[in-house]
Image: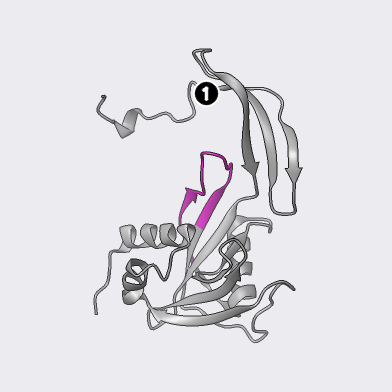
Amino acid sequence: MQEFRPENYLPDSNLWEEGKKTSAFKTPIFELVSVPKVSPDKTISGNFFKVESKDWVNVIALTSDENVILIDQYRHGLHSYCLEIPGGIAEKNSILESAQAELREETGFVSDEWEYLGKVSANPAFMNNWCHTYIARNVYPHPGGQDLDESEQIEVYQYPLNKIPEILEKNILHHAIVVAAFGLFFLKYGEKKK
């Protein structure tokens, strides 16, 4: 076993050789592709599958009194409602514009104070995209309210920021991308106790 040295870590060096990808299945959200690959030492080769998708965004939206805007919506994968933060596919001209649009559309709130918090890979074992997290501070209602997609039904809540760790521990907030977003937030800003 070797000692890990972050300063020497080069994740984009000595990559596997890739052949031409072929599409196996395409939807409006993602495409499943097959890619022939060969390991750098030539001992492993084969067709490997990956899911290609646009990047995603999510937003930790904070009110002036330190409440977080949460959304609750039905999720088809779990066949259950899921408490989350606003987010979605990055479809605008920039990641920031996509985050701003998702906040406005899903919650009816807007902000003039945006901070990029970081990004995480959804599942690099078979997915190619990133999820970017922004903090929107001092959010306020937009006169137009929500602007939901025709397939969305979203309830909007606010909850004290300092109590978020409690609902993370109770698995009430369980969406992996949401948990990662709050992980980035609390790493940077710590946990505020009241």
Q: Residue 27, position in %: x, y?
A: 74, 51
Q: Is residue 188 above or below residue 45?
A: below
Element under label 1?
loop
Residue 129 position, x and y percent, is: 58, 46
Please, what is the three-letter code of the amino acid marked with disc 1? Leu
Give the image location of residue 12, x and y in percent. Answer: 49, 29
Q: As rendered, which of 38 and 129 lies closer to the eye?
A: 38
Q: Quadrant of residue 79?
A: bottom right
Residue furthest to the front in view is: 79
Residue 45 rendering spot, x and y as whole percentages? 58, 19
Between 192 and 173, the one nearer to me in the picture: 173
Report the residue at 48% width, 24% height from top: 13
Membership of 117 in magenta stretch: yes
Q: Which residue is disc 1 drawn over?
A: 15
> Where, by quadrant of the figure, is residue 10 drawn?
top left
Q: Quarter of the image for the N terminus: give it.
A: top left
Residue drawn at the location 46% of the way across and 57% of the way down: 176
Q: Residue at x 70, y 44 (%)?
A: 31
User: Is 176 situated left or right of 47 in this image?
Assistant: left
Identified at 49% across, 13% down, the residue is 41
What is the number of callouts on the image?
1
Q: Residues within 10 Å of mark 1 (few under 14, many from 20)?
A: few
The quadrant in which residue 16 appears is: top right
Instruction: Locate the C terminus and report the quarter of the image it occupies.
Output: bottom left
First to last magenta residue range = 114-132
Q: What colour scheme governs how the chains and residues are painted in the rendered image of this protein?
A: one colour
